[in-house]
Amino acid sequence: MEVFYTYFNKPGSSDFTRLKELFEYSLKKHNPKLKITAHVSEYPAERKPSERSAHLENIHKLKIWNEKVQKARGALLLVDCDLLILDDLSEIQKYDADIVFTDRDMKFSTIRFNAGVIFVRPTKEAKQFFQKWCDISENDFDIENDFWKQICRQAKGATQSTLTYMVDNNICQNTKLKFIPCDIWNCAAADWSRFSDKTKILHVKSELRKWFLMRATEQQMEEKYNGHLINILNKYEAELHGNR
């Protein structure tokens, strides 16, 4: 299995460089034998003045991931680089599916999917799904359109909106999809309250990212922002710099 991620080379991205270095360290610590490929990309140009930068990033990242999937011969783990890896990830290969996504019960959040961790077996069906997902995201998604605006209000983000649309409408129905829990495989803001010793991936987003980049301690963080998680991040970063 190859781990593949995209990193945008843009001005003022030093904070994200810090997250990327922590991600790479934690990944290699728990998965020393995995092949890791980083794709450095220039920041995407605006397609239209109204388009949010986050949507541009998501669509451009999906385009890069799709190109990787179309050429792939072996299993891929496509990931964001604002992750902290806490365990061996090889178990994700056990699932009998073309593509494995992370999702959560809607009782915890209106955001069903988080597209920051995706396992792919490069079957014909998986490649068809990714191509269709990329096409819809690039050509059809428009945040100014009321149809997409309504989906995006819940799904958050361009590619999570188009993924929701594809799943809900059973597009590429021959592709075998599997959905595994975010609180274990992609523990983002909506899942932090369910973080446990079973969690394999912590997604460093929103308030947790802000506090980490401010070099906060647990005592400085408000309880609602899960201060214990900052201790874990700080511990890994101390290990990273101690090993240099």
Image: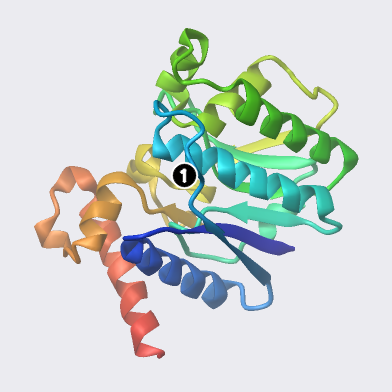
Q: Quadrant of the C terminus?
A: bottom left
Instruction: State how many labels appear.
Output: 1
The image shows residue 144 at horizontal and vertical percentages of 44, 16
Q: Residue at x 71, y 45 (%)?
A: 66
Nearer to us in this view, 207 or 158: 158
- What crowding class fits label 1: few (fewer than 14 Cα within 10 Å), some (14-19), or many (20 or more)? many
Nearer to us in this view, 21 or 113: 21
Nearer to us in this view, 24 or 140: 140
Q: Of all residues shown, which one is farthest toward the right? A: 124
Residue at mark 1:
183
Look at the numbered disc 1 and give the secondary structure of its residue.
helix
- Residue 97 lies left or right of residue 217; in this view the side is right
The image shows residue 105 at horizontal and vertical percentages of 49, 27
Q: Amino acid at mark 1?
A: Asp
Seen in the picture, residue 52 relative to 67 is either above or below; the reply is above
Tell me the quarter of the picture where residue 11 sits.
bottom left
Q: Residue at x 41, y 89 (%)?
A: 243
The image shows residue 218 at horizontal and vertical percentages of 17, 61
Tell me the quarter of the picture where residue 38 sits.
bottom right
Seen in the picture, residue 194 relative to 90 is either above or below; the reply is above
- Residue 118 lies left or right of residue 98; in this view the side is left
Q: Residue at x 79, y 24 (%)?
A: 172
Q: Quadrant of the N terminus?
A: bottom right
